Image (spheres, rainbow, N blue to C red):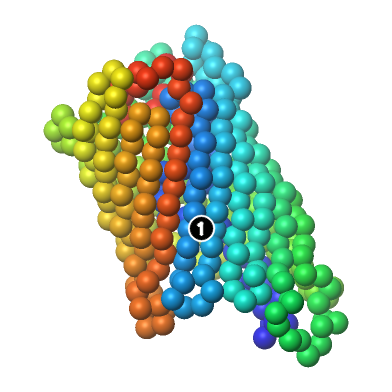
Amino acid sequence: MLYFLLSSPKTAAAQDIHFSQIDVNPILYNPAYSGFFDGSGRFGVCYRNQWASVSQAFQTIAATAECSLMRRRYWGDGLSLGVILYSDRAGSLNYGTTAANLILSYYKALGSSNNNFISAAIETGIGQAGFNTNDIEMRDPDVIDATSASFLSLGTGIAWFYQPNDNLYFKIGAAGRNLNQPDISFLGTEETSIRRRFTTYARAEYRLWPFVSLMPLAAYMQQHKYRETMFGCNAKWYISESSNRQLSFSAGLHYRWRDAALLEFITEYNALLIALSYDANLSKLTPASKSIGSFELTLVYRLVKSKRVNRKAMPCPII
């Protein structure tokens, strides 16, 4: 069984980290979102616990940091630097990946109104994938060339932001990661690579009333033969939008096609965001999982010079 797991590129080789909260900490989904926030920096921590009822749970943790390198209001553009650190572990072999990614993004205003932006980013990372054989018995341990493998990954992304008025905005993005398909072979006779991963994403917000808005979402991801389609909507309540106190609460229901239903709750207080979500498993694994999917928790904090928060829905990095 161990030999089959390591030698098959369709199993252990092609998996990336996975978070259901797509745009809560957006650079995890698309590097081009780096730098799009009010303030001089943004920091986040994400934790996910998945399928604890089936076997030893899949556990993923990621930490992110972003800062502005340059902002030119006259030209309406800027540069941002982002970092992603993540680790995931699962199963009795404690198989997982630990990696660090570096992101450089550039954003540009399309016009002088500061309501229409395009951004692009490049990403590179180093990581190590491996497993632990201390707690298992192997008939032929000589078939394993190594229990860990280091790799270099390359990625890129592009995103568009547009807010025609204070009551409506759109953002659309696409990204590609593992473009070089890094090799993580554990057997001397087999070549196993991390497959390319492509994602697209669209979110809108429309204010129905002064303090209530709807936020529809659609996302698609493909990695080799695995495809994931997700759509849904959040309702957001703006409890306070004063100059020194911004407080909002949102709740959303999303559906991942033939896989899971996602319930999400988000609270924002000034520069702090807290998000909690739960995936109810609806796939063929339901009899074993008893519909228990995953829990996910995210904390995001922005560095701001003052307590005043821009009331515009789109987080403009220039103003």
Instruction: Name, please, the residue furthest toward the front.
Output: 135
Q: Residue at x 40, y 34 (%)?
A: 272
**Figure quadrant of residue 184:** bottom right
In percent of width and height, residue 241 lies at 25, 25
Q: Residue at x 31, y 20 (%)?
A: 244
Q: Is residue 297 left or right of residue 145?
A: left
Q: Is residue 179 left or right of residue 267?
A: right
In percent of width and height, residue 201 lies at 42, 47
Q: Is residue 176 left or right of residue 233?
A: right
Vertical arrangement, residue 184 with respect to residue 287, above or below = above
In percent of width and height, residue 214 lies at 22, 42
Task: Look at the image and tell me in which quarter the C terminus lies.
Answer: top left
Q: Residue at x 42, y 56 (%)?
A: 296
Q: Is residue 202 visible to us here?
A: no
Vertical arrangement, residue 240 with respect to residue 125, above or below = above
Vertical arrangement, residue 83 with respect to residue 113, above or below = below
The type of residue carrying mark 1 is His
**Figure quadrant of residue 239:** top left
Instruction: Name, please, the residue furthest toward the top.
Output: 74
Residue picked out by circle 1: 18
